[in-house]
Image (tube, helix red, strand yellow):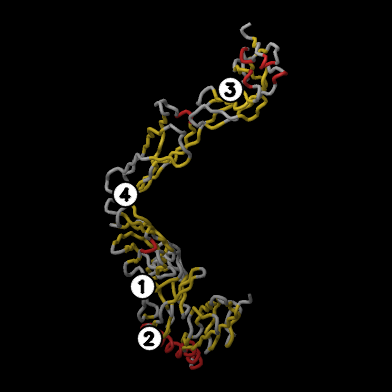
Amino acid sequence: DDIWDIDPAKNYGYPYLSWEDFEPIELTITGDFTAQNKVYDGNNEAQFDTDNLSLDGVDSEFDNVSLTDVEIVFEDENVGTDKTVYITSAVLSGDDAGKYTLSLVDAPTAEADITQRPLEITAESDSKVYDGSPLTNTGFSITDGTLASGDSLDAVTVTGSRTDAGTSDNVPSNAVITDGDGIDVTANYSITYVDGTLTVNAGAADSIAISPQTSTITAGDTQAYTAQAYDAYGNPTGDVTGDTVFSIEGGAEGSWDDNEYTSEKAGTWTVTGTYNGLTDTAELTVEAGAAYAFEVETIGAQTAGEAFEITITAVDEYGNTATDFEGTADLSDSTGTIDPEITGNFTDGVWTGNVTITGDAENNIITVTDGLIASSSQEFQVEDDATNVVGVIASILASIGAIGGAAWLFILGQQRKRSIKIFSSTGGYVASPGEGAYKYKHGTVVDLIAMADTGYQFVEWTGDIGEIDDINSATTKITVNGNYSIKAIFAELVK
């Protein structure tokens, strides 16, 4: 009877039952939901991805009730996969909401991931001028990403040290991150470490070193040099080749093109590099090249038929003694009477020996040849041997008594000197006996050697050519039986 209200004013005299006097109906949550994955942020809050939740137990007579303001959370805030997500609270809304209560017992759950929070930590860079002590810097900073709210970066190990001039890495590692309760939460971060750079700079240039310090090249070859500057402690300050002036001691000749030297004279030479008043030296050995020509020492006047000494030196293109030449060379002269006609073997590029010339000439020349190499001595006089002249006269007188005046005239004819004049056209020269006028005894056989210049070729001998063995050969002989004038003809090579 306590719950009935008999007041006629409330129910027109009929018994009335008030709803407030009943126990509310308990509703539960049914359906399903999914939660979004998230990056670690220091709390366990979760967000719906999909929401298919509904109420179970609603009376159809009082169905103006709905589920609102549902809140979900992860089981904890730490990184993990397939972490359980729970419903922690919800609100009943609608006109009939007061007739119900909501139970979260056996409410649906979901699973989602919490991934590591990216963070970049960079070690500090530092620099100084070399002073012999190590350069270190343990500083660091966060250069990308942020800490979750309430977390703090407590420590980072930075390892790096540089003493000598140059650069090296300053390496960060082993970061420690804690939350507001001092709990280590480093595992909740994906940390990228970036090295800093420690730089020790060399001081001002105090010395230089040029290189190579020693080298050996052949005359005509090129040697390149470099220069490196160093501070007072021996630290390299940089390549200064472009600002260094290079030179070589006098007598070496040759030429420089910046830091490249083209050699000429054989020998061992001192090379000097100078940079801002700082100098260094190196040793360069220049060796002679292959034989290019022969040099015959000056020959004085000689007597026909008497042996005399000559010295011949094989030289390279730059006039250095070609010490590697150890062969022999052919000898000829303007009279065609030199003996021997082949030298002995050269020693260290030099041959000294005796020769005899039986013919006489006012401007005699000795020609030395070896393959394509042909060189001549200076002109020198070869005089008749007075003893031979006396002998000839005695022979003539004896002949007169024996065979009469005709024989006398014949013998005199044989003793007469003959003149031969030798010329050449453009494009070459006559190497033997040379060019000019020469006198020979009647019947003397003289070597003729014509040499063509570069780009030209020998064609023929012209003039008084009747006694020339082969007028089409650059190397031939002529028998002097009279006075002759001959010319070597050259022509330009056809390209």
Q: Name which residue type carries label 4.
A: Lys
Q: Name which residue type carries label 2.
A: Val
Residue 87 numbered tag: 3
Q: Nearer the viewer, mark 2 or mark 1?
A: 1
First of labels 4, 2 by sequence position: 4
First of labels 3, 4 by sequence position: 3
First of labels 1, 4 by sequence position: 4
Callout 2 secondary element: helix
First of labels 2, 1 by sequence position: 1
Residue highlighted by disc 1: 309
Residue found at x 38% / y 84%: 383
Total numbered labels placed on residues in the image: 4
Q: Nearer the viewer, mark 2 or mark 3?
A: 3
Q: Residue furthest bottom?
A: 405
How far apart are labels 3 and 1 at the CA level? 125 Å
Q: Nearer the viewer, mark 3 or mark 4?
A: 3
Residue highlighted by disc 4: 128
Residue 289 in picture, x, y percent from top left:
43, 64
Callout 1 secondary element: strand
Residue highlighted by disc 2: 390
Residue 391: which quarter of the image? bottom left
Residue 85: which quarter of the image? top right
Marks 3 & 1, CB-CB < 8 Å contact: no
How far apart are labels 2 and 1 at the CA level? 26 Å
How far apart are labels 4 and 2 at the CA level? 100 Å
Residue found at x 54% / y 30%: 115
